[in-house]
Image: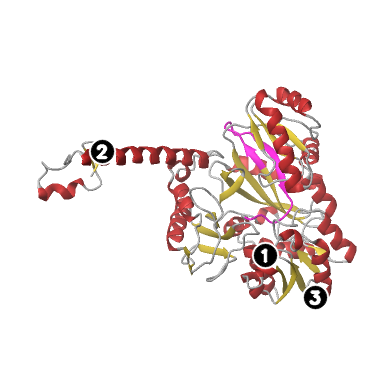
Amino acid sequence: MNRISKILIANRGEIAVRIARACHETAITSVAVFSEADRSAKHVRYADEAYEIGPAPSVESYLVIDRIIETAVRSGCQAIHPGYGFLAENPALPAACAAEGLIFIGPDADSMALLGNKTEARKVMEKAGIPIIPGAMEPLKSEAEALVAAAEAGYPVLLKAAAGGGGKGVRVVHSEDELPSAFIRAGAEALSAFGNPDVFLEKYLIEPRHVEIQILADNYGNVIHLNERECSVQRRYQKLIEESPCCMLDEAMRERMGKAAITAVKASGYTNAGTVEFLVDSSGDFFFLEVNTRLQVEHPVTEMITGIDLVKEQIKIASGEKLGMGQEDISINGAAIECRISAEDPETFLPSVGYITELVEPAGPGVRVESGISADYDIPVYYDPLLAKVITWGKDRQEAIARMLRALDEYKIKGVKTTIPFHRRVLIDKGFSEGNYDTGIVTRIEHHRTNDFLEISAIAATIVAMNDENVDFVSDVKQDDRWKLSGRNYGGIRS
């Protein structure tokens, strides 16, 4: 067993603070790294030690593996935790750690590389007997090859980056005419995002639900799952709201998906924490999507319903400890929801940067905030716009939703625009509140809002026009009765 007493956190923002907190609770010294733009950032102030690693652009700081390794060695760390994003799914980091005698808190380079390649992962899952979405098993070499594969799978199809994730290099293709240009665009985006232009193709499922299974695997062959998370609230393949448990799963289906996730992990030789993701179609059949070989942004949702600290478990596994629990020890207590709060315009999702002039975080029963910001913080333009996550727990789903709505009302971030209003729109949507939704929910909500804006504009134009003609909508209504018109439709026009 390798005793870990000092960990370098190769990340920034809220996830770096989250990992440092786990270190503090276990008497482990936390070491932060920061770019020139992050000198006064919250994660820098929170950690026990902090070291500058380069200029503001991530390609000159957070993504420079040699600088990360050199800082870990110089500061006397035994281990590196990558968090998520940046280098968390780059096999070069665990390989560099192994070469330097450092412990990487995550899977080894081989299993990360295997599962990070979507086509290779599909092969492993098919061989293990896990259902996969029909499509190509190899990267597509040309437009002609893509046309053949699409014809075999049947339109619509999905073009996806073979080496990536997070919605990059993804295109939905509805017809043969659309495919050539989509193939070129997907390849170009994949090359830009991941340094690899390879794309593959699979059948596009109509109105699926995105359900993932959290797993823990030690170095002794023990694997358990910690139940599921529903991640269907997405915009352009980016998750925005997650919850657990998934309200469409019954115990039988939960058990089947959990066993499939464990099979997937064992088949790939994966260790530490990870997530096996599935798509569930309208008939209730599920298909393997991918494995995220790291801690997920939405991991607090699982922590809230299981009481298990996933970061601490990651550290224990990396230290060489066996899992201290079996599948029979895992249960679901209540329900939890997470909203990702980003510095973006809630209507257009364009980035919003600047100083945070006022910050009031929500609190109270069942509310947890994972934040990387503070008052007077200057939001950099160089990084992901995620500012914080709000997680609520309730004895059931409705209480978790009610607490989230209350928490969002309490949350005040002034000086920049945030996605808080967007989250409120989703939470009060009938489909979401009733648990009857899929990955198309955000598109439908945005479409309805567009129609509402058009209707409001038409009404406003009518009022202006009629006022110009000196029309009095309520002239024949008694003065004492006018209060009754508030909020009502009167003569087709809201008074």
Q: Quadrant of the C terminus?
A: top left
The CA distance from mark 2 to mark 1 is: 54 Å
On the image, numbered disc 1 is attached to which residue?
A: 12
Q: Is residue 283 magenta?
A: yes
Image coordinates for residue 494, horizontal then vertical, percent = 25, 42
Residue at left offset 19%, top offset 38%: 469
Regarding mark 1 in the picture, which secondary structure is present there? loop
Please name which of the two marks, 2 or 3, marks the residue nearer to the observer: 2
Answer whether residue 142 is visible to the viewer in this image.
Answer: yes
On the image, numbered disc 2 is attached to which residue?
A: 465
Q: Is residue 164 left or right of residue 114?
A: left
* Residue range (magenta): 278-297
Q: Quadrant of the N terminus?
A: bottom right
Nearer to me, 87 or 280: 87
On the image, numbered disc 3 is attached to which residue?
A: 75
Q: Callout 1: 10 Å neighbours few (<14), some, many (20+)?
A: many
The CA distance from mark 1 to mark 3 is: 18 Å
Image coordinates for residue 424, horizontal then vertical, percent = 45, 52
Image coordinates for residue 343, horizontal then vertical, percent = 55, 58
Pick out the residue farthest to the right.
99
